[in-house]
Image (cartoon, grey):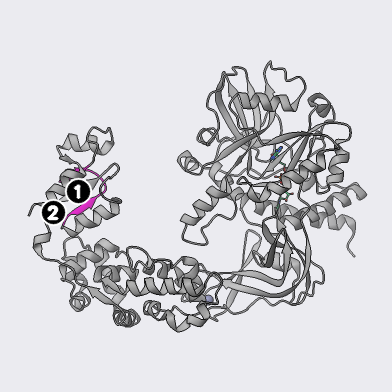
Amino acid sequence: MISKADRIKELTGILNRASKAYYMQDTELMSNYEYDALYDELVQLEKETGITLSNSPTIHVGYEVLSELPKEEHEYPMLSLDKTKDVQVLADWLGDQTGVLSWKMDGLTIVLTYDNGELVKAVTRGNGYVGEVITNNARVFKNVPHRIAFKGKLTLRGEAVIKYSDFNALNSQIEDSEAKYKNPRNLCSGSVRQLNNAVTAERNVYFFAFTLVVAEGMDFYNSRMQQFEWLSSQGFDVVEHVLVDRENLPTYVAQFADRIADNDFPSDGLVLILEDIAYGESLGTTAKFPRNAIAFKWADEIRETHLLDVEWSASRTGLINPIAVFEPVELEGTTVSRASLHNISILRALQLGKGDVIQVYKANMIIPQIAENLTRSDTLEIPKECPVCGKPTEVRCVNDVSSLYCVNEECPAKHVKRFSLFVSRDAFNIEGMSEATLEKFIQSGFLREPADMFHLDSYHDVIVEMDGFGEKSYQRLMASIQKARKVTLAKLIYSLGILNIGLSNARLLCQHYRNDLQAMLAASTEELTAIDGIGPVIAGSFTDYFADEQHRIELKDLLGEVEIEQENFSEEGRVFDGKVFVITGSLEHFKNRNNLKALLEEKGAKVAGSVSSKTSYLINNDSTSASSKNKRARELGVPVITEEELIDMMKKP
Ligand SMILES: NC(=O)c1ccc[n+]([C@@H]2O[C@H](COP(=O)([O-])OP(=O)(O)OC[C@H]3O[C@@H](n4cnc5c(N)ncnc54)[C@H](O)[C@@H]3O)[C@@H](O)[C@H]2O)c1
Ligand SMILES: [Zn+2]
């Protein structure tokens, strides 16, 4: 049995490592549930023994500020909040006072300062004493007023947050499943702490005020509610709130709870602050918490169940993720049977084994997690072999987080990227084949080389049983694969993912050889370099790729599956041979720039990114625009034409 003092030391270390990962590296060494439980244990031990180490997380707030952003000390230090999960404790805490109950928003806390009616400063909470200056970023938040009617000095605090809907929309545009953002809080933290505010502007960050710190010369009649009302009148969005007393508190808490599932703004609980400002301030603070406010965290609905298995899911970068599979349980209204275990560190901390009795819950009422392992058999083996390729795995430790990796360069799990290109719009254009689907097929061993794409029908029975699949979606996918069999040679070459061979280079090659693939493959690097537009690097990539016997076999297999569409490479169609175009501004006739570019290239033109003395035409529908391209074109005497004029030119022989 270790002594209490030793346990205090141990817990302080564990919690500090977890905080560092959580706040600074956007990773988690343990669930919030476990963090809070260990934290409570530490608080208890510190109370019993009277020992608090100088680096104890119970007396420090937030994260150390290590970014490249400028730092600034807060005029009024920002503390954390004491918490409870018990409505009764919350009611007792309020006693005979009235309080203001609001969402505890889950983003990044920011302090704004206005002077003479202007936003002059925005600083993050940081470690509570020193934060990062992000004034220019705050200016591009969706709803922060740049000017207000009040001319005195105003300091207020609030939470910068990103909506679930915006978070999901952004993630859906990221094809690479590992580059996706983990949650709106991580995304918000990254978006607000940018060095370039153009990035912040795109992320739709909202700011909700929750504390008025000072408003010079203003009298709020000692009321938090008055302060909130006044902030609204100045143009701020104030966190949604309601005035409560001990009697009606439980009803209001229940009403907030009912709305979590539909709330587009992420929250991780509620905050209760005393309505009486002066009385609240007279209570003072502890080392870490103000005494005039308290946070309420949702008492998670916890269910006991049995761990059936841990699945290991390999991904493109080689990372192998553990997923717990358990006997299905009802949680917050849905049936749950799986929960991510995140990484090896979390898995080891839980000492799992098949058949263990585990407690599961939904974090913030949304994401299934394992809270506790009651039986801790610790018999689970971490696979020594990759579930996909069978080659040895490796546990790697980065920033105190251990994760399992497949180190085999040839592991099919890593081929997802390659197949993503293969099915993309400019290549085989297989609609409905998402990266997630590719990953499943590759993991199951259905896709090893490109030609395999056309044999997926042999796995019909397995595919229709897969998660997210049914007979209907299977048929739809097969139909788009069938459709894709007809392809131009240029697209086929592009689809192979040869280094430096984009679609336009593949087109150049096909044009030059009039689609004669054998001649293309027989050409030497020197011969290819002689083609206009093909340099030694591109030529070298092409010949290197096909010097590999395996690549030639794969190409042959693929050719056996497809029908090459003949293209017209006759000189007549090439009305823009040797011309150089630059496109700027928005387009009306063509869907997008890539479309127009492809058409121009087909007609023999080159499309460049900037105007130079070599430019033949600048395409711009607004010839009066003050854009730099327009200006440069005028300086150089390059004709500026509209899309209409361009279309006319194409018609001419
Ligand atoms: N999983 C891990 O490894 C890990 C590590 C560290 C921390 N954590 C989690 O973070 C928590 C501690 O976080 P914290 O100290 O940053 O914040 P907190 O949970 O103590 O929350 C207090 C802060 O919430 C903000 N806030 C949001 N809405 C508000 C409102 N309406 N009114 C007033 N304040 C509002 C304020 O900035 C306030 O300071 C832990 O309980 C734990 O769950 C997890
Ligand atoms: Zn592998």
User: Which numbered disc flags the more N-terminal residue, 2 or 1?
Assistant: 2
In the rendered image, residue 617 lying in the magenta stretch gets the answer: yes
What is the distance, in whole Å, between disc 2 and disc 1 at their CAs?
9 Å
Q: Position of residue 296 (x, y in %)?
A: 77, 44
Residue that carries the numbered disc 1 in the rendered image: 581
Q: Position of residue 585 (x, y in %)?
A: 29, 41
Q: Is residue 28 left or right of residue 353?
A: left
Secondary structure category for the residue under label 1: strand
- Residue drawn at x 20%, y 67% is 509
Q: Is mark 1 within 8 Å of ligand 2?
A: no
Q: Which residue is at the front of the view, 395 or 279?
A: 279
User: What's drawn in magenta, residue-wise?
Assistant: 604-619
- Residue drawn at x 50%, y 41% is 200
| 193 lies above or below 211 | below
Type of amino acid under label 1: Phe
| 236 lies above or below 531 | above
Secondary structure category for the residue under label 2: loop
Mark count: 2
Q: Residues within 10 Å of mark 1 (few under 14, many from 20)?
A: many
Q: Considering the whole magenta stretch, tell me its main secondary structure.
A: loop
| 171 lies above or below 567 | above
Q: Residue 576, labelled with which disc?
A: 2
Q: Is residue 380 left or right of residue 550?
A: right
Type of amino acid under label 2: Phe
Q: Which residue is at the front of the view, 51 or 276?
A: 276
Q: Is residue 122 left or right of residue 550?
A: right
